[in-house]
Image: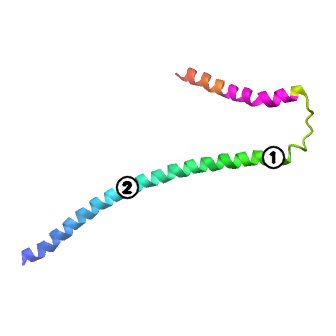
Amino acid sequence: MLLANSFPTLILFKLDVNYKYYKTIQTKTLTRSLQEIITMENQIGFVLKVFLFSALISFLIKYTGPNLSIPATATNALIIILLPTIVLGSVLLYKKLNDNSAH
């Protein structure tokens, strides 16, 4: 009688151990898959943000640009052309100076 009762218990214990092992593997795989999806969503989100920001700038240039009364002079042309370069150079120089002072 004792053997008859212990046999199902051993099978259930083995099934339970296998199930826990399977759940552990499944959880690790699911966690890895979720991390990959989140990373991909961040990349897709970044691309969408860049796309929408570019579309907004294009829209503003196309529809509000002609309404601005900016005279067509050489000075204004130089400002419009050189301003992005100067701003980006200033930001990069600022970052470089802060990185060197931290180390």
In the visual, does 20 lie left or right of 13?
Answer: right
Residue 59 lies, in percent from the top left, at 79, 48
Which of the two labelled residues, at mark 2 and mark 1, occupies the earlier sequence position?
Answer: 2
Q: Label 2 neighbourhood size at 10 Å, few (<14), some (14-19), many (20+)?
A: few
**Element at label 1:** helix
Find the magenta span and give its range. Answer: 76-91
Q: Nearer the viewer, residue 64 or 101?
A: 64
| Occupied quadrant, residue 31 | bottom left
Residue where numbered disc 2 is placed: 29
Residue where numbered disc 1 is placed: 60
The residue depicted at 88 percent of the width and 26 percent of the height is: 74
The residue depicted at 61 percent of the width and 47 percent of the height is: 46
Residue 54 lies, in percent from the top left, at 71, 45
C-alpha separation, residue under disc 2 versus residue under disc 1: 46 Å
Most frequent secondary structure within the magenta stretch: helix
Q: Label 1 neighbourhood size at 10 Å, few (<14), some (14-19), many (20+)?
A: few
Residue 49 lies, in percent from the top left, at 65, 48
Q: Is residue 90 magenta?
A: yes
State which mark lies toward you, 2 or 1: 1
